[in-house]
């Protein structure tokens, strides 16, 4: 029986009970496909409803192909059993998408006949809400889980949690290993980066000093340039201002002169106009007289109709000419008025009008004499006025160009002032930045000094710790060799005497053997440390330095601890011990009899495979009061006596 999980998500469901208010509940929907091969290959759809907060909330539904056929006929489904799970999942996903909205389109309802969900059958409805009606697309009946099913479900959950736990632990171990590797790598890279940082700081300090010197030089040069440019601009501005004032005064004087001249011309023109008006009146009077004569001629020459018609035609033509002349005079008067207004702006018209004064006076005299010459004079005046208009336009263009030049000069001066202000602001900003850079440089130099001091202190501590480690290792190797030699001597030599059950036997070399206390019931051999203590006691008492009682079997651990404490406090003194400190000659009577040399033999410095290393002793064990008389000096550990250099045992 194989199970394939298709859907497993938490969905908000509206729970409705009999006589109870509707409430929302977060339910996990699990859909699985169960394939059964014995005795016939079948596929079942299993749907399970659970609550993550309530482990006893369990509802199951198993739909076979036969059950699906009945469900299809009851609810009018149009889907086969193979496509039903996917369609059901699509409906659930639509409900999930709409669950956070105020008015969801698709929703899930869990309907129970009982007032509460208390191990009673339940129906799960997929409902679509319309403005008109609630449509149930699918309704599935779920049965509550039995005790066995709940236990099985809880067991599966526990199994999954354990598997997740193991997986997480393995991941945690891997991550810890990776992190330790990364930490070591980062520490190495940090040391390298710190070195690089020191180099960069040195380079940076040199670079900043060079930059500061360059900036100071550039600032001084730029200040001088700015002052020179400012003085030049001020001088140019004053010169231009004076030139413009002079030009302005000259133009005002010229315009005033032209105004006075134009006023004189205007008066002359008005006088001429009045004279023209008088001539026109005279002409009108003459015309009226002519008309009277014509009427008389008509009355007299009634017979000559043809001549009369010709005379009528001539009269009409003369009237037309008079009308044309009157219209021309009116147009000329209007043009003269317009030109009077424009004359105030003209400059060169004055010269032309002065030249034409004589011509106009002659023309007026001729006009008084000859009316026919009026038309010619009027035409000449119109041409001259056109020329004056052109001259006025040219003058207006010149004025506009002058005004534009003035505006350009004003804008240029304003821009130059703005540029000067901006340059002054930039100079102030650069001064502030240079001050800030100097302060930051001072702070960085202080930090560099502090870091150098810390580096020196750490280097000194490292060297001291290395020296201490070397002395510890050398002393421990020497003690291990001593103990191994004592044990080998005890194994090879036979005991000299067997009396006094509690007394320790002494070897031919003066080494005490392990005692066995028959009276106290202790028959097992004592530890090598105890033997070493017994070896030290008789020799120390013979030397007469200080009396040290032989420790008993029960106090061997206390003795080793006191050795550790005392030797830890006096290790630094041991490395500085002079060559004059020697062991007394009356140390071992057995050595005297055998004729051995003072100090340790070379065999004690050879390492043997069966030797027991001395563990747990600290570096200061050698400097205690019990071991000091028996420790070899640099003279005794010389290359002549031992065959090994003394620096191997006492570095520094």
Image (spheres, grey):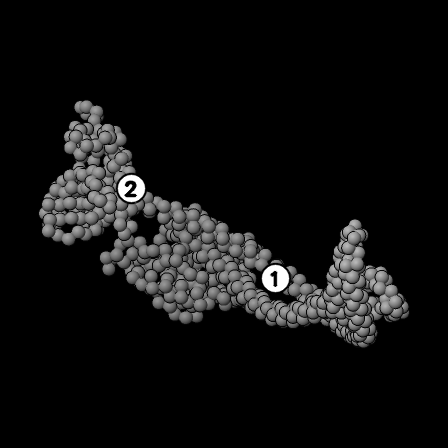
Relative horizontal placement of residue 276, taking residue 611 as reference (left or right):
right
Rendered image: mark on residue 601: none
Are discs 2 and 1 less than 8 Å apart at CB?
no
Element carrying mark 2: helix
Identify the residue at horizontal 82%, vertical 75% (top origin): 264
Query: Residue 52 versus residue 647: which sits nearer the camera?
Result: 52
Relative horizontal placement of residue 136, taking residue 346 as reference (left or right):
left
Please determine whether, in this image, residue 535 is positioned above or below residue 14.
Answer: below
Could you say which quadrant of the image residue 35 lies in?
top left
Identify the residue at horizontal 49%, vertical 66% (top origin): 572
Query: Residue 410 versus residue 40: which sits nearer the camera?
Result: 410
Crowd class of label 1 (few under 14; some 14 to 19; many from 20; radius 10 Å): some
Relative horizontal placement of residue 117, taking residue 592 as reference (left or right):
left
Query: Residue 196 versus residue 480: which sits nearer the camera?
Result: 196
Identify the residue at horizontal 75%, vertical 63% (top origin): 326
Which label's residue is closer to the chain start, 2 or 1?
2
Residue at the disc numbered 2: 93
Q: Quadrant of the C terminus?
A: bottom right
Q: Position of residue 445 (x, y in %)?
A: 60, 68
Q: Position of residue 397 (x, y in %)?
A: 76, 63
The answer to whether residue 2 is seen in the rendering is no
Residue at the disc numbered 1: 201
As measured in the structure, the alpha-carbon distance from the residue carrying label 2 to the one carrying label 1 is 62 Å
Element carrying mark 1: helix
Could you say which quadrant of the image residue 269 lies in?
bottom right
Identify the residue at horizontal 22%, vertical 47% (top origin): 13
How many numbered tags mark residues here?
A: 2
Please determine whether, in this image, residue 493 is positioned above or below residue 413.
Answer: above
The answer to whether residue 463 is seen in the rendering is yes
Relative horizontal placement of residue 587, taking residue 551 as reference (left or right):
right
Instruction: Judge depth for marks 2 and 1 and give the one in front.
Output: 2
């Amino acid at each position: 029986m194989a199970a394939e999980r298709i859907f497993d998500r938490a969905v908000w469901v509206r729970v409705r009970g009999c006589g109870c208010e509707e409430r929302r509940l977060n339910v996990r929907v699990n859909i699985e496909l169960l394939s059964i091969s014995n005795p016939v290959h079948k596929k079942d759809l299993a749907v399970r409803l659970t609550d993550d907060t309530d482990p006893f909330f369990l509802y199951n539904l198993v739909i076979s192909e036969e059950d699906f056929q009945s469900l299809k006929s009851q609810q009018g489904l149009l889907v086969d059993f193979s496509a039903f799970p996917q369609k059901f999942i699509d409906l659930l996903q639509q409900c999930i998408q709409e669950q956070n909205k105020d008015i969801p389109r698709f929703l899930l309802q869990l309907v129970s006949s009982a007032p509460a969900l208390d191990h009673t059958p339940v129906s799960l409805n997929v409902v679509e809400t319309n403005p008109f009606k609630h449509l149930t697309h699918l309704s599935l009946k779920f049965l509550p889980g039995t005790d066995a099913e709940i236990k099985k479900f809880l067991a599966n959950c526990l199994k999954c949690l354990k598997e997740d736990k193991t997986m997480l632990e393995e991941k945690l171990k891997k991550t810890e290993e990776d992190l330790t590797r990364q930490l070591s790598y980062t520490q190495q890279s940090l040391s390298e980066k710190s070195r690089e940082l020191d180099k960069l700081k040195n380079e940076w300090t040199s670079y900043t000093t060079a930059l500061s010197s360059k900036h100071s030089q550039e600032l001084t040069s730029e200040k001088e340039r700015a002052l020179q440019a400012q003085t030049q601009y001020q001088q140019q501005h004053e010169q231009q201002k004076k030139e413009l004032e002079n030009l302005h005064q000259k133009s005002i004087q010229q315009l005033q002169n032209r105004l006075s001249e134009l006023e004189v011309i205007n008066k002359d023109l008005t006088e001429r106009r009045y004279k023209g008006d008088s001539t026109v009146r005279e002409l009108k009077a003459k015309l009226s007289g002519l008309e009277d004569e014509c009427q008389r001629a008509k009355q007299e020459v009634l017979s000559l109709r043809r001549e009369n018609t010709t005379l009528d035609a001539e009269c009409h033509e003369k009237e037309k000419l008079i009308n044309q002349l009157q219209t021309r005079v009116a147009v000329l008067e209007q043009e003269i008025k317009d030109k009077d207004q424009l004359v105030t702006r003209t400059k060169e018209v004055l010269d032309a009008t002065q030249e034409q004064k004589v011509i106009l006076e002659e023309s007026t005299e001729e006009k008084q004499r000859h009316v026919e010459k009026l038309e010619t004079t009027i035409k000449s005046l119109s041409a001259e006025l056109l020329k004056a208009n052109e001259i006025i336009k040219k003058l207006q263009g010149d004025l506009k160009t002058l005004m534009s030049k003035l505006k350009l000069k004003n804008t240029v001066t304003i821009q130059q002032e703005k540029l000067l202000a901006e340059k002054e602001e930039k100079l102030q900003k650069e001064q502030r930045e240079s001050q800030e850079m100097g302060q930051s440089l001072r702070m960085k130099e202080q930090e560099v000094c502090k870091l150098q001091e810390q580096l020196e202190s750490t280097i000194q501590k490292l060297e001291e710790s290395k020296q201490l480690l070397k002395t510890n290792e050398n002393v421990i190797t020497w003690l291990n060799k001593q103990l191994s030699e004592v044990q080998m001597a005890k194994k090879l030599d036979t005991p000299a005497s067997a009396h006094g059950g509690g007394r320790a036997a002494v070897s031919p070399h003066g080494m005490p053997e392990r005692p066995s206390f028959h009276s106290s019931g202790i028959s097992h051999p004592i530890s090598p440390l105890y033997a070493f203590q017994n070896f030290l006691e008789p020799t120390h008492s013979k030397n007469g330095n200080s009396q040290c009682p032989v420790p008993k079997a029960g106090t061997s651990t206390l003795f080793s601890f006191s050795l550790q404490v005392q030797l830890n406090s006096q290790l630094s003194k041991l490395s500085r011990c002079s060559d004059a400190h020697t062991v007394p000659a009356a140390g071992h009577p057995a050595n005297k009899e055998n004729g051995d040399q003072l100090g340790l033999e070379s065999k004690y410095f050879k390492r043997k495979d069966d030797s027991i290393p001395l563990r747990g002793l600290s570096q200061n064990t050698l400097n205690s009061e019990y071991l000091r008389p028996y420790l070899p000096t640099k003279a005794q550990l010389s290359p002549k006596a031992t065959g090994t250099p003394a620096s191997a045992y006492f570095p520094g």
